[in-house]
Image: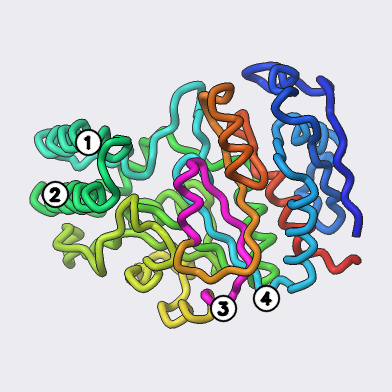
Amino acid sequence: MSYYFQLQHSIFRPRHFPFHRFSHYNNFSPRIPFSSFSCGKDLEMEDTKQASEMVVGDPALLEKKIDSIRLAGPHKLQVIADFDATLTKFWVNGTRGLSSHGLLQQGNPEYDAKRQQLYDYYHPLEFSPTIGLEEKTKLMEEWWGKTHGLLVEGGLTYESIRKSVADANISFREGVVELFEFLEERDIPVLIFSAGLADIIEEVLRSKLNKTFKNVRIVSNRMVFDDDGHLVSFKGKLIHSLNKNEHALDMAAPVHEQSGDLNGPSDENDSVKKRTNVLLLGDHIGDLGMSDGLNYETRISVGFLNHNIENSISCYRDAFDVVFVNDAPMWGVIKLASQMCSSES
């Protein structure tokens, strides 16, 4: 198996800035052969574009990891993905896309305002460098618990979720459907980890992708609705931003029946944990912790650096095996997954 890494100059210029501005961060851009899955795209054009959006800090290490995962076979591989700004776009129609949690309008302005007040207070604490992990974890549990309490107290309905998603400025990256299809054909599970609300994520998947995937499971906070569609409680233990990892697999409640085959039964958790090779997708360095709790053998991490690129590219390049900038589509990830699953030697 051979891989070719070569410098791509300014053949393609991304929408927001010329690529040559970042050439000093990346003296090579990998061109990963892509023969088994075409996505219906002009691959030469896509290769040129992806080369300008893709940064690899250690090409030799990436090549070694791809070889290791390919030799182990697809039956040993799982995909772990963050949702907001990873599977979804950072920019939508020229404005900042909403998160799965931020899009929710409760239908009760008083309680929407109360949840915003909690955000304004706790969000700075989440990223404070002076607060220790133990104290910060307690604060996050407090924040999530209060927010969930307001959703119940304020009379959230499932219809409000549907309307919020329908009206929301949220969209998936180009190529997400094709990535899920590629993985589904090979029985490779996709675990979407989120500290948000599983019911909202499911509604976004249903309404924006217009199809379900039997290999996709959601590990997030699950709601319980009464017969009239009113929220009455939450299932399972609380999943917040600091425990969003494979330890949380056992916290995740089964998916609602109305979601079709999006998730498998919870007794599949053990079989997922036996898949010890990981393709991890995230947009924050903290997302690297999503694989905590899994004794993995080989992990390839892909980071989506969506903004503040000049200031962050260096640390992202050092943290992730592959970095995509410019709010890039998923074609490069599909090509990477294709190479990992290739039977060619």
Amino acid on which disc 4 is placed: His
Give the spatial CA distance, label 2 vs label 4.
41 Å
Q: Are marks 2 and 4 in contact (CB under 8 Å)?
A: no
Magenta stretch containing residue 274, yes or no?
A: yes
Choose mark 3 or mark 1, whichever is in front.
Answer: 3
**Residues in magenta?**
273-291
Q: Which mark is residue 119?
A: 1
Q: Which mark is residue 146?
A: 2
Give the spatial CA distance, label 1 vs label 2.
11 Å
Choose mark 4 or mark 3, whichever is in front.
Answer: 3
Q: Which mark is residue 274?
A: 3
Give the spatial CA distance, label 1 vs label 4.
41 Å
Q: Earlier in the sequence, mark 2 or mark 4?
A: 4
Q: Is residue 61 above or below residue 46?
A: below
Helix, strand or loop at label 1? It is helix
Q: Position of residue 41 (x, y in %)?
A: 79, 42
